[in-house]
Amino acid sequence: MTTLLRIATRQSALALWQAEHVAALLRAAHPQLAIELVPMTTRGDQITDRSLAALGGKGLFLKELEIAMAQRHADIAVHSFKDVPMELDAGFAIGAVLERADAADAFVSAKYARLDALPHGARVGTSSLRRQAQLRALRPDLLAVDLRGNVNTRLAKLDAGDYDAIVLACAGLDRLGLAARIRHRLDPPVWLSAAAQGAIAIEHREGDASIAELLRPLHDADTALCVTAERALTRYLQGSCQVPIAAFCLQTEIGLHLAGLVGDAASGRLIRAEDDGQSEAPEELGVRVAKTLLERGAGELLGHQ
């Protein structure tokens, strides 16, 4: 008997690629499974004239997909894990985290090969406060300008001359076959990405054991360890896209290594911390690095009382 699984997804080219990727993995793991995509437009997609910080956060990309699952119009939802809030709404769970792609940010420009090649006062497009803070720290002379829209929309604005350069995620460009647009990778330890950047998460209704079982073969335990540490850091700092927080974790020979930072998009001030931890305790590592950031003054930048 064939089982039907419906995947809720945003309608952008990148979101559809991710949903199709998940569908292909599911078909390979479960040949009897029939899969149907349920493309949807979220509020975060509809409002592109204001920054995510001004709109209230990344959860804007999830709500409609969660409603579809709650109303049984879809069984799972596929997300870029960096867009998933630190705390899911009641009734939902993450059933699988896929093997992570390139977690780095990409410097993209039609004229300039690297960030340090940009002329004084150049316009760099990004709506991410995390990226703006790091840009200002490295090049305080640059003008960071808001940039919303999907990947192709952002590239079109760059090509039209609206910006001298833009910053995007390497993983998104790779997945859309646009890796040639990457002029330079912005790498750790100098530049840190968002928590869980490059990873894909699959959300489902909490307590749905049959769906959880279907997703089990897609789960990558190594990626899950690293993103758990990164998200634990962000959660402890009560972070959202309204606060410039970055976190990047790597597996090492002795366990995990986590680097984090809190920044100020206006001044370019960055507070950094890093530490090693056991693979069995990624949450503890995330909290420990977050506490070190607070000890070094991150609370002031975060607006903690």
Image (tube, grey):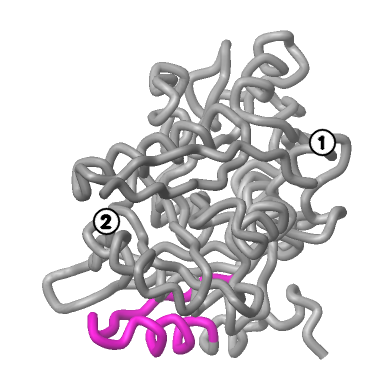
Which residue is labeled 2 in the image?
218
Residue 269 visible in the picture: no
The front one of 39 and 254 is 39
Q: Looking at the image, which residue is at 62% across and 67% down? A: 85
User: Against 128, is 238 above or below?
Assistant: below
Residue 149 sits in quarter: top right
Q: Residue 104: x and y, percent?
A: 42, 45
Task: Indicate left or right for 137 with 46 as reference.
Answer: left
209 versus 185 height, above or below: below
For marks 1 and 2, the one nearer the N-term is 1
Element at label 2 = helix
Q: Where is residue 169 in the image (x, y as percent from the top left)?
A: 50, 39
Judging depth in this view, the residue of 58 and 67 nearest the camera is 67
Residue 201 appears in the figure: yes
Query: Looking at this view, is 61 or 172 the one in front?
Result: 61
In the image, taking residue 282 as reference, residue 190 lies left or right, namely right
Residue 139 location, x and y as percent? 65, 41
Classify mark 1: helix, strand or loop.
loop
Which residues make up the magenta segment?
Answer: 271-290
Left or right, 92 with reference to 241: left
Q: Gap in Å between the C-alphas at discs 1 and 2?
A: 33 Å
Q: Which mark is residue 48?
A: 1
If the image is split into quadrants, where does the C terminus sit?
bottom right
